[in-house]
Image (cartoon, rainbow, N blue to C red):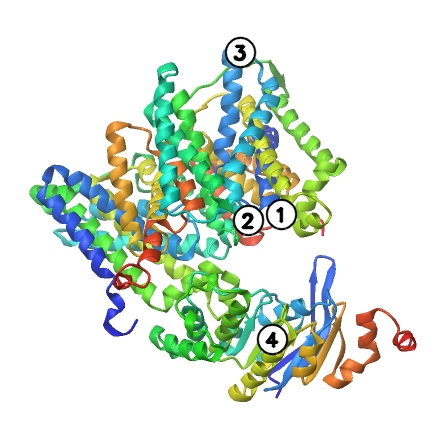
């Protein structure tokens, strides 16, 4: 049974179609990337999976439950975690408190009290290497540190599916490689968590994703294993705006 | 934050109230001032539970005090012949709390689904709306209000009634203040407080973290409203023995609550106490030296606080004691 | 007889509603451009009312000529308040406070003392109350802190902040007016005759007020759609980032929009007194704030035209309900009508918070 299943999902804003009849599945433990040019509808798709928007048409199943009309917090309880493109940790809360909030209210949060959540948070603080900043308000951190806090906070929720929105935007190649290793590590160790990325950066996509979903103008263009997708002429055309033969002829 | 240190911050709170009470008892000439200060602290603590902790502004807040006042007034004037003695006061408080909770549920059902600005708009007319409902439909004597001093004397005997309205009413106000403080500390130290912090900082991120924001907003809203009801029942009803609609639905009490919470530090435990004391004392002196000018002076101060010192006094204090031993006591 | 009365009340409602609508346009404009809810809205209407009153009573100027004066006063006030209190909270370029420590506070205290001394000297010449001096001193001290130690704001202030700031600005206006004019209710009498429609009688002043409101609404429409300045302002509503990319100075648009919104609101106070020339007192604004919000929500909070039509709908509903409620035994129709406005607000917020009119996609 797939962990996440989207079936004929569509979303319109006013007259504009942001997501157009998209269907796909994600299995437990899979690493997938959603890519596409700007305006392709990737973030909207994310928001639909996550419950920030509700679809106009179609269904979404998560862990066998029809979550199409569920609010975000219910989806979180079922095991969806998410990070944002521009990291937004709770600024006036400390790093420890931020992560503890993820633990307290996430999928495993039901039985945890505040003290236990703080202990769980400490484990994740060690994982991301921010022990020195444990009691500092998250608002004062650098963007990279904020990103790490957000990831730790999402992980503390013990998700089965982790949605990471442009997690590597603005990073240099070395940091990207480190992040890729980190994400693979999460998948291997936590086992059940699936990571679905939304990325422009081919280096990350190539290194990380087993499968790629390419979106274009709101619709699904291709849904293939990474190697095939990157060589697919349709994908090249969409990114470069020219016919593949033309491109090959010139190079 | 392990074990017994968790609820330590209640110590300075209790100390402050104890000192205030002692001062009032020792200097009978200043009792009215002390009672007024206690009222402001209680008002601040109750209001802080919602505005301070969720970041939503309820412009109609005074309505909860109003219906609480009516709750006590209606109980005493209806049940004075029942031979209940002091029990009538207890019932009055229960009715007050029920009334304000019911109003909170009614208003909350509509308003709490709405985001920040829309919520404020929805609440803007609550006090007006309710006042005009009472006057317009002639509920509970309509615009004439209820005078129940006679009923109180019937129920408790002349001497006891006197002592209730001149002393015990104010003691009850202290009680409401302490209750509000205890609840605030409990929320701050448990999951509720963190949920509220998250939704105050970033409501959308909070939802994605698994927080049912509406549920927590309701919890804070109803707690804050019920406390306001108890405050109205004690500080207004029992003290004055009458209730008059234009008085108890008067928006400037909401303004005062806002000033007190902002001055002291929204969302903190000690904040409303600091705010209540400073505001109360300033107002007292202003009333003597420059009557009628209080709002003129406080209004620009609110703006200054919001723009320059949004954390308020206790917020700044927290920053200063960070990393010291005092940190455990100041929240 | 009942239907005659009802239709008479409806016509009155239509005419009144257009004035209500005009009074709400400023509110919607400010929300549309800045996402700021002006909770002190009623106080600005009150300022317009007093402008008309003073010009008429002291200078014999008919209210119709008070309109441009009110507009100018309103826009100046709007600019002052925007740069003074609102900009630090909403403008992307800030003038937030960087750091206020002991040294800065010390200097600010120095400013306070200096201003107080200056005021004492001045009060030898002008008769100034000490409270007023304190008030001015606080304002100057605040301005000192904000503008001398201002810096780039890091993140958007919470919504709570602008609500309380606009609310406090309203309170300041009320108190200042109270100090100058006392809280006594005043009125003036400007009679131009009446128009008799058979089932109802309309004073010409009311017709003028209604016509004035309509004119303003039309002028605003033309401004937004036919002038460059107006279109620049509209672009900020649609997409502030895109607007900036096209070279629109968003900061200045914010200031201009706020100032225009306040100007419209103050002007509406004049028109309102042409309709109801009595009961002018510093606290008259309160009732209008609630009505304005009902109307704004009816018409769609961000749309000035929606506000105008919302006003008409509200005027009709209010007068219609008054007639119906007056026919009910046992109640007090005046108070119940005000309760009814509040219920209307809640109902609309519940079912259609974005307003009854659909904005063009």
Tell me how far mark 4 sits from mark 1, CA to CA.
51 Å
Tell me how far mark 2 sits from mark 3, CA to CA.
44 Å
Mark 2, residue position: C348
Mark 4, residue position: A175
**Pointer 2 chain:** C
Q: Would residue B280 be seen by someone viewing this image from the given angle?
A: yes
Q: Nearer the viewer, mark 4 or mark 3?
A: 4
Q: Report the residue that reaches farthest toward the left.
A: B159
Label whose residue precedes the other's in the sequence (1 or 3): 3
Mark 1, residue position: C356
Q: Nearer the viewer, mark 1 or mark 3?
A: 3
Q: Does the residue at mark 4 contact the one at mark 1 (Cβ under 8 Å)?
A: no
- Taking the spot 24% from the left edge, 39% from the top edge, the residue there is B281
Using the rendered view, name the quadrant where residue B320 is placed. bottom left
Q: Does the residue at mark 2 contact the one at mark 1 (Cβ under 8 Å)?
A: yes
Tell me how far mark 1 sits from mark 3, CA to CA.
43 Å
Image height check: is C235 above or below B109?
A: above
Tell me how far mark 4 sits from mark 3, CA to CA.
74 Å
Q: Which mark is residue C276?
A: none
**Pointer 3 chain:** C
Image height check: is B323 above or below A207?
A: above
Q: Which mark is residue C59?
A: 3
């Amino acid at each position: 049974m797939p962990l996440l299943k989207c079936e004929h999902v569509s979303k319109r804003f006013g007259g504009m179609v942001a997501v157009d009849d998209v269907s796909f599945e994600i299995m437990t433990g899979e690493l997938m990337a959603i890519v596409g040019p700007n305006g392709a509808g990737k973030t909207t798709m994310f928001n639909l999976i996550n419950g920030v928007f509700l679809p106009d048409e179609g269904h979404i199943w998560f862990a066998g439950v029809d979550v199409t009309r569920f609010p975000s917090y219910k989806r979180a309880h079922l095991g969806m975690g998410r990070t944002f493109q521009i990291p937004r940790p709770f600024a006036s809360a400390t790093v420890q408190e931020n992560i503890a909030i993820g633990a307290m209210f996430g999928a495993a949060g039901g039985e945890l009290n505040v003290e236990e959540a703080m202990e769980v948070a400490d484990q994740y603080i060690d994982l991301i290497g921010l022990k020195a900043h444990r009691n500092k308000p998250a608002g004062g951190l650098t963007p990279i540190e904020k990103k790490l806090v957000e990831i730790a906070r999402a992980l503390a929720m013990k998700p089965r599916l982790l949605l990471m929105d442009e997690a590597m935007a603005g990073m240099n190649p070395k940091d990207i490689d480190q992040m890729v290793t980190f994400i693979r590590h999460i998948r291997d160790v936590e086992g059940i968590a699936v990571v679905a990325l939304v990325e422009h950066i081919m280096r990350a996509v190539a290194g990380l994703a087993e499968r790629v979903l390419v979106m274009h103008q709101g619709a699904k263009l291709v849904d293939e294993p990474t190697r095939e997708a990157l060589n697919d002429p349709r994908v090249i055309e969409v990114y470069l705006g020219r016919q593949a033969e033309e491109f090959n002829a010139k190079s | 934050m392990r074990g017994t240190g968790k609820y330590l911050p209640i110590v300075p709170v209790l100390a402050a109230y104890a000192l205030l009470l002692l001062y009032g008892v020792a200097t009978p000439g200043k009792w009215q001032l002390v009672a007024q200060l206690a009222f402001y602290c209680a008002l601040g603590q109750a209001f802080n539970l919602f505005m301070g902790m969720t970041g939503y502004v309820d412009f109609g807040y005074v309505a909860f005090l109003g219906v609480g006042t009516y709750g006590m007034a209606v109980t005493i004037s209806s049940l004075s012949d029942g031979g209940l003695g002091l029990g009538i006061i207890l019932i009055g408080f229960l009715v007050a709390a029920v009334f304000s909770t019911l109003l909170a549920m009614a208003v909350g059902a509509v308003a709490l689904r709405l985001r920040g600005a829309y919520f404020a708009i929805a609440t803007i007319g609550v006090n007006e709306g309710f006042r005009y409902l009472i006057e317009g439909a002639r509920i509970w004597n309509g615009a004439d209000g209820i005078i129940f001093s006679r009923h109180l004397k019937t129920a408790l005997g002349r001497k006891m009634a006197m002592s209730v309205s001149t002393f015990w009413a104010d003691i009850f106000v202290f009680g409401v203040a302490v209750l509000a403080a205890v609840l605030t500390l409990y929320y701050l130290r448990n999951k509720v407080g963190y949920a509220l912090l998250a939704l105050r900082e970033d409501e959308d991120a909070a939802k994605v973290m698994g927080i049912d924001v509406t549920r927590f907003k309701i919890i804070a809203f109803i707690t804050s409203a019920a406390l306001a009801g108890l405050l109205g029942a004690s500080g207004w009803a029992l003290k004055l023995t009458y209730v008059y609609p234009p008085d108890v639905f008067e928006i400037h009490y909401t303004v005062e609550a806002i000033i007190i919470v902002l001055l002291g530090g929204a969302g903190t435990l000690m904040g409303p106490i600091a705010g209540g004391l400073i505001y109360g004392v300033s107002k007292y002196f202003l009333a003597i030296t420059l009557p009628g000018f209080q709002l003129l002076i406080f209004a620009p101060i609110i703006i200054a606080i919001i723009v320059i010192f949004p954390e308020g006094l206790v917020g700044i204090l927290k920053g200063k004691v960070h990393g010291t031993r005092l940190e455990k006591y100041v929240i | 007889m009942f239907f005659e009365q009802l239709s008479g009340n409806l016509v009155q409602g239509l005419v009144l509603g257009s004035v209500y609508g005009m009074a709400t346009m400023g509110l919607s404009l400010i929300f549309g451009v800045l996402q700021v809810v002006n909770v002190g809205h009623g106080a600005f209407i009150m300022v317009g009312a007093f402008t008309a009153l003073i010009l008429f009573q002291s200078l014999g100027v008919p209210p119709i000529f008070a309109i441009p004066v009110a507009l100018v006063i309103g826009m100046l006030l709007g600019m002052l308040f925007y740069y003074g209190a609102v900009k630090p909270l909403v403008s992307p370029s800030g003038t937030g406070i960087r750091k206020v420590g002991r040294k800065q506070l010390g200097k600010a205290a120095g400013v306070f003392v200096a201003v107080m001394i200056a005021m004492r000297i001045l009060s030898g010449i002008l008769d100034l109350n000490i409270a007023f001096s304190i008030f001015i001193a606080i304002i100057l001290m605040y301005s000192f802190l904000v503008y001398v130690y201002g810096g780039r704001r890091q993140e958007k202030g919470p919504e709570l902040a602008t609500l309380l700031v606009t609310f406090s600005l309203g309170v300041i206006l009320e108190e200042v007016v109270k100090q100058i004019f006392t809280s006594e209710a005043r009125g003036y009498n400007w009679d131009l005759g009446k128009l008799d429609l058979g089932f109802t009688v309309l004073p010409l002043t009311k017709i003028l007020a209604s016509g004035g409101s309509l004119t303003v609404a039309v002028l605003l429409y033309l401004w937004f759609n036919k002038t460059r300045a107006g279109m620049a302002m509209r672009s900020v509503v649609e997409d502030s980032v895109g607007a900036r990319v096209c070279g629109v100075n968003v900061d200045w648009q914010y200031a201009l929009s706020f100032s225009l919104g306040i100007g419209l609101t103050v002007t509406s106070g004049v028109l309102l007194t042409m309709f109801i020339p009595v009961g002018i007192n510093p606290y008259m604004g309160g009732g209008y704030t609630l009505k304005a919000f009902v109307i704004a929500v009816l018409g769609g909070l961000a749309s000035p035209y929606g506000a105008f039509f919302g006003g008409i709908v509200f005027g009709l509903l209010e007068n219609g309900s008054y007639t119906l409620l007056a026919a009910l035994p046992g109640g007090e129709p005046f108070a119940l009508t005000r309760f009814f406005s509040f219920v209307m607000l809640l109902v609309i917020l519940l079912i259609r918070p974005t307003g009854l009119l659909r904005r063009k996609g």
